[in-house]
Image (cartoon, rainbow, N blue to C red):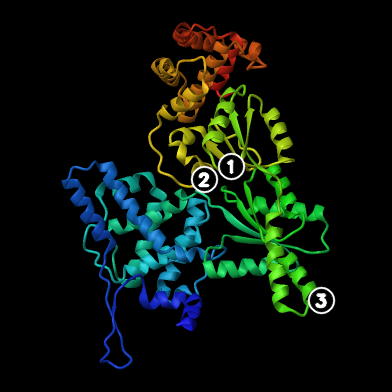
Amino acid sequence: VQKSLIRLRTQSTEIFDLLGSQMLFIYDCHEESQWIRYQDTHDLYVEIRSQYTELSKRGINTETIHNIINSHVNTLFKRYNYYRSFNDEYDTEQLSKIVDPKIIHMVTKIMNTCKNELQREIQPQVFYGLCLHMNSLLNLQLNQSRVDDDQIVHIVQEYPKEYGISIQLGQMFKDAFNIELPIEEIVIIAMFLIKDEEDTEGHPVLLYIFHGKGVATSLRDVTNTLTHTNNVYAYDLCLEKDSATALQEIKTLVQRIDDGQGIVVIYDMGSIKTMLDTISEETDIKIRYIYFPITLLGLDVARKCSQETDLEYLYHTTMREMKTMLQMNDSRKEIIITLCHTGEGGAFQLKQYIDQYSNLGFKTVPLAISKREELISQVMALKKIYRIHCFVGTYDPKLMGIPFVSMTKVFENKPEAIDKILMFELIQSKQLDYSAVYSFLEEQFKCISVSKLKSILPSIIDELEIIYSLSADQKVGLFVHIACLLESCKQGVCKQACKDADTILEDYPEDFKVVSKVLKPLEKAFKVIIDDNQMAAIIMILNKL
C-alpha cells in the first residue's frame, strides 16, 4: 500500500485517464484479472437546464438564475485546474494520453488565433481545459438545449470576438469528427475564453531563499512538481555573492513574481530578512517571512558529530538549541498600531478597546495619520524597536506591506472575537451597528451621556453619509472621532486636531457651511462649541484628505 501511494504521486495523469472524475467502480471477483468500470453518464449541461427550469417555476429572478450557469462553468475550471501546472508553454505529451490528438491540434491552432485577435496571452489552464472539454463532447448527447437563451444573447452581444473564435473551433470540430456543435455549446466554449480574461485576481506566491548553489532551486522544482501549482520560485544566495548585488537581484525577482497579493518567503539565515524588509518598503509589496534555519542547524550538527560520540546526547542538545534558536530569531516585541484620521482621540479609544478585550499580549500604539509623511516617519521609528503586527483603523494606509484590520470589522463583532480578528481568522460578521461602540464608550466616558449620544449622533452620521457618500469604515471612524471630540470638549481639554486648519477652511468654504449646519443640533444638545480647528479636522475626514 505504501509503495502504491508513492506511485500515485508520479502517475496522476495515467490514473486520471483510467478513472476520470467518477467515484464508483464495480469489481467482479469471478472474472480473473478483470474489473468493470461504472460508466458515468452525468451531463453537466442537462443539470444546468434542469435547475434553471426548476428555479423559474419557483419564481426566482432571472439574474439569480443566470448565476447558476456561471457557477457550473466554474465547476469545469476547477475540474481542469490540475493542468495549470504547465505555465510557460503548452505541454501536450501528458495530455495526448487522454485527449484525441486531433483535438489537441485544433485547440492549439485556435489558441494562436486568440493571441492575434484578442491581443492577450491565453492561460495554459484554458488550453488544457478546452482540450478536455472538447474531448468530452465526443461522447455527450448534443441534442438538448444546454444554456439559457438570455445567456446566449448576452455572450454574442458582449463578447463578439470570443464568440467568433468559438465558431471557428466548432467548425474545426465538425470537419474532424463530423459532429456539429449547437449554438449552446459554442457559447460554453466562448465562456472559457471570457473566464480567462475576467479571472485576473492574483494569489500569494512562495519564494525560497537559501544559501548555497542550487539549494533553493531544487526545493522549488520539487514543490512545483508535487503540487502542480507552479506558484513557487527560488533564489540561490551564493556564498561568494556580495550583499548589494544580492539585494538588487532579489528585489528584481520579487517585483517580477508578485501577483498582487504578496509573497511568502522561506529563508535560512543571515541578512535575508533585513534585505526583504528593505525591498518591501521600497516596492510596497507585502512580504511575510518563515524562518527555517536548516543551514545553521546543519552546521551545528556537523560540528557536534566531529566532537561527540554519544548519539542521544547530540540529538537532544541539538533539539533544545533549535527551539531556542527559533524563539530568539526576532526578539523585538510585537505591536499593533491604531490609526485615526486626525488627532489621536479615536486611535486612543481603539487602543483602549483592544487592550481591554484582547488576550494576545500585543502592545498597542495610537497614531494620527493627518499627514502621510509624518506617519511614515513614526512607523519607521517604531519598526526599529518593534515588530508591527498590523494597523487597525478607518482605512488602510498601505505602508511597508503591514496588514490592515478595519475598525468596522472590530466593532461589528462581539468583543470576544477581537483576537480572531487581529489574527486574521475568518469569522462570520454581522450587520454593522453601534452597540459595541456604545458599550465601550459607556465605560470610558465620564462627561458625555452615551444614552443621549445614541439618540442624536447616528442621525447626524447618516446625514453626512448621504452628503459625502461615506463607506462603512468612514462612518465608524467619524462616529468615534466626534464622540471622543465631544468628551474632550466637555472635559475642557480640546487639543489642536488639525495643523493645516486655516488652509482647509480656506479651500473648503462650502464644506464648512454644511458641516457647521449639520453639527448644530449636536452642539446644542451637549452644550459645547466645536471650534473651527475641529471643524477642519472633520472636513479632512469627510473629504479623505
Question: CA gap, disc 3 to disc 1?
Answer: 46 Å
Q: Which residue is mark 1?
A: 403
Say the numbered circle drawn on residue 424. 2
Please name the residue shown 73% across and 40% down the image.
385
Q: Quadrant of residue 17?
A: bottom left
The residue sitting at the left extreme is 57
Please name the residue shown 40% across and 59% down the image.
77
Q: Residue 343: percent from the left, percent from the top?
A: 62, 21
Say the numbered circle drawn on residue 307. 3
Q: Residue 520: percent from the left, percent from the top?
A: 47, 7
- Evaluate whether residue 235 shows in this view: no
Q: Residue 143: percent from the left, percent from the top?
A: 21, 63
Q: Secondary structure at mark 2?
A: loop
Along the polypeptide, which appears first: circle 3 or circle 2?
Answer: 3
Q: Is residue 493 left or right of residue 297?
A: left
Please name the residue shown 61% across and 24% down the image.
344
Question: Which amino acid, mark 1?
Answer: Pro
Residue 27 lies, with reference to residue 370, above or below; the image says below
Question: Which amino acid, mark 3?
Answer: Gln
Say the numbered circle drawn on residue 385. none
Quick one: 477 or 387, which is closer to the camera? 387
Q: Secondary structure at mark 1?
A: loop
Residue 458 lies, with reference to residue 306, above or below; the image says above
Q: Is residue 374 left or right of residue 38?
A: right
Quick one: 249 or 472, which is closer to the camera? 472
Along the polypeptide, which appears first: circle 3 or circle 1?
Answer: 3
Residue 40 lies, with reference to residue 29, above or below; the image says above
Query: What is the crowding at mark 2: few (fewer than 14 residues within 10 Å), some, or many (at least 20)?
Result: few
